[in-house]
Image: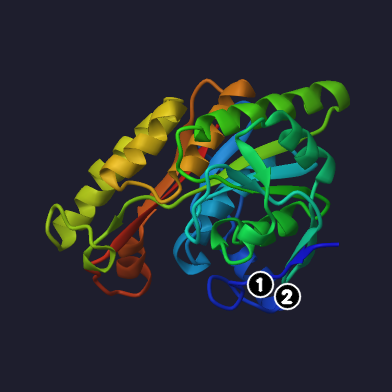
Amino acid sequence: MTTREAVVAGRFYEASQSSCREQIEQMLPGGRVELELPERIVAGIVPHAGWVFSGALAGLFFAAVKQQMEEVDSFVIFGAVHSRTSAKAMLFDAGQWETPLGAAEIDEQLGGEILQSGGGLIQADRGSHNFEHSIEVQVPIIQYLFPQAKIVPMMVVPFDGAHKVGAVVGQVVAQAAEQSGKKVICVGSTDLTHYGPAYYFTPQGTGEAANRWAKETNDQFFIDLAVSMQADRLVEAAGTYSSACGGGAAAATVAAAKELGAAKGYLLAHESSAEVMARVYKQSSTDSVGYATIAF
């Protein structure tokens, strides 16, 4: 059996089982999610920075799912791709992922059906997942809230076919629900604008006003495309405006959500690392990364 070991435990989130669980408990909402939500959540977009920065936003989405359904059979997780390039989406099709909370099993049946239906858009490629963090940081949260759930990890490069990958997945998930009542949630992992000298992106200069532009204008344009279900425009927008590192993952998520009956997205939270630095650490920052949580 192929086991993918955790590679960012101890850096992006706590490495021991007890500390990891405690960190999740601290970043989850303290009560009900009192926000406007879809009648039935089928998908979501979440950030993937270190939990001290964006964990609460990711936790908000999974808590909203838990609020609507006690159990989920599987999560298809579309990941951003920071470590390599590929002409196809890369599916981790068999085995398990190890985290501080134990092993998350791969839904090999669902993954196989996706692979079979994916034509030339999706390939089985476990090795490419070894050093990518964008999916890994979601898995312990899923394990904590949905301990019996399986996962289907898929890295989606920002290519022209990204939204088609999502459409395929949505169709397979819809068919599984119809035939066997299987409960599957699709999750896309992306951060938004990486702004500042550290990211070589400073079209508005530097400082508080520039960071505010990155969030309120550059991020927001990408968010607006996502909530209005314009999956086919997200990859181009992310590349043209440097507004998301996971444009492919976001495009796949929105397309999957549309296949599963979603008519629009609901923005649950939107924050930047500069705002977190100011609020939590009382420090200003010349660099900033945007984070958003969207439910479909």
User: Residue 80 appears at what percent x and percent y?
Assistant: 51, 51
Q: Sort mark 2 into few (<14), some (14-19) or many (20+) by Cα contacts within 10 Å.
A: some
Q: Quadrant of residue 24?
A: bottom right
User: 172 and 54: which one is in front?
Assistant: 172
Tell me if 146 is positioned left or right of 122 in this view. Answer: right
Q: Quadrant of the N terminus?
A: bottom right
- Which residue type carries mark 1? Cys
Assess whether mark 2 and mark 1 are in contact (beta carbons under 8 angstroms): yes
- Seen in the picture, residue 239 relative to 56 is either above or below; the reply is above
User: Residue 101 appears at what percent x and percent y?
Assistant: 75, 68
User: Residue 267 appears at what percent x and percent y?
Assistant: 44, 37
Query: Tag 1's secondary structure?
Result: helix
Q: Residue at x 52, y 65 (%)?
A: 51
Tell me if 52 is positioned left or right of 137 in this view. Answer: left
User: Residue 289 appears at what percent x and percent y?
Assistant: 34, 58
- Seen in the picture, residue 157 relative to 131 is either above or below; the reply is above
- Which residue does the numbered mark 2 point to in the structure image? 17
- Which residue does the numbered mark 1 point to in the structure image? 20
Q: Sort mark 1 into few (<14), some (14-19) or many (20+) by Cα contacts within 10 Å.
A: many
Which disc, if any, is residue 118? Answer: none
Tell me if 294 is positioned left or right of 166 in this view. Answer: left
Query: Tag 2's secondary structure?
Result: helix
Q: Residue at x 44, y 64 (%)?
A: 53
Residue 72 visible here: no
User: 270 and 154: which one is in front?
Assistant: 154
Residue 194 visible here: yes
- Which residue type carries mark 2? Gln
Taking the view exactly as shown, the residue that stands out farthest to the left is 205
